[in-house]
Image (cartoon, coloured by chain):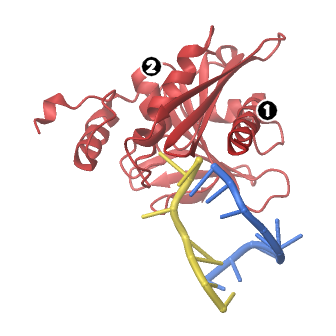
Chain colours: A red, B yellow, C blue
Amino acid sequence: MHPTLARPHAWDVSLEQAQWIQTNYRQKVIFSPLPIEQQNSLTAVAAADWADRVFAVAVTVDLDRPYLEIRLGTATTTFPYRTGYLAFHQGPAILQAIEQLNRVGNVIIVKGHGLAHPRRFGLASHLGVLLDIPTIGYAQALLPHNELQPSPNPLVFWVTDAEGAVGVAVYTDRVKKPCILSIGHRVDLESLLAFIHLWMKDHRQPAPLRLARSFLRQQLRNMKKE
DNA sequence: GCGACAG
DNA sequence: ATCTTGTCGC
């Protein structure tokens, strides 16, 4: 295949093409501060499989105003799930869910990694570059190439790879494993720390993401009954 | 003691 | 993702 044909919005691709897209589009990721006043609205997205389909939920919430919108998207599975290629598996369904929203928040929190990815182009970064919207990756496990380094805050560790820091690991609750926030697109490490303070408090999961995931599981449960 | 590579 | 017991980990 001619590499120039591969685009980040091409989902039905081979493993080799997917890898090509990741290694070539990682440079599109922008590291920039996301001011705290721009974190006042949030869209959370999460996805899961059921019977050769991927279902995705997108939730938009305002921080200071009562606003809640929740949408479901779905797509047939083309690219099978593989570690490191989650975007190609879930991307289409998630985009569809986002498109249903009347309003997308100023930042999108994505269930999956951003730069905490072998080629620094995980699902959150992929969606961020596609939509050119600030994104943050949220996950509950690290990929093995990443490491944790102590930070001034004993509850927070820097997530690093050979190139440097890509995110933060946060120990909250009394859960053993930390949650992992990594840079998706148009954010920086400081923005992640502000995000934690603003949207997570001392909880392990931001409320909108928790809402999206429980709604998603509810949908899946209903489908299994039929 | 059976795993430990996002979902 | 899900199933599901148990509780940190080498």
Which amino acid lies under the numbered mark 1 shown in the image of this protein?
A: Ala
Q: Secondary structure at mark 2?
A: helix
Give how far apart the Cα atoms at labels 2 and 1 are: 23 Å
In the image, what residue occupies the spot 62% across and 18% down?
Answer: A35
- The front one of A173 and A47 is A47
Q: Can residue A122 be seen in this snapshot?
A: no
Nearer to the camera, A186 or A10: A10
Query: Dot 1 corresponds to which residue?
Result: A207
Q: How many C-alpha atoms fall within 10 Å of the one at disc 1: few (<14), some, or many (≥20)?
A: some
Q: Is residue A84 visible?
A: yes
Coordinates of residue A55 in the picture (x, y in percent):
58, 35
Give the structural element (helix, strand or loop) at label 1: helix
Q: Is residue A102 above or below residue A208?
A: above
Report the side of A141 relative to A93 (left or right).
right
Picture residue at 53% right of the left edge, 15% below the top: A99
Q: Residue furthest left?
A: A2
On screen, residue A146 above or below A51 = below
Q: Residue at x 53, y 31 (%)?
A: A188
Image coords of residue A110 (percent x, y): 58, 34
Residue matched to label 2: A131
| Amino acid type assigned to the residue bearing label 2 in the image | Leu
Residue A49, position as x, y percentages in the image: 56, 45
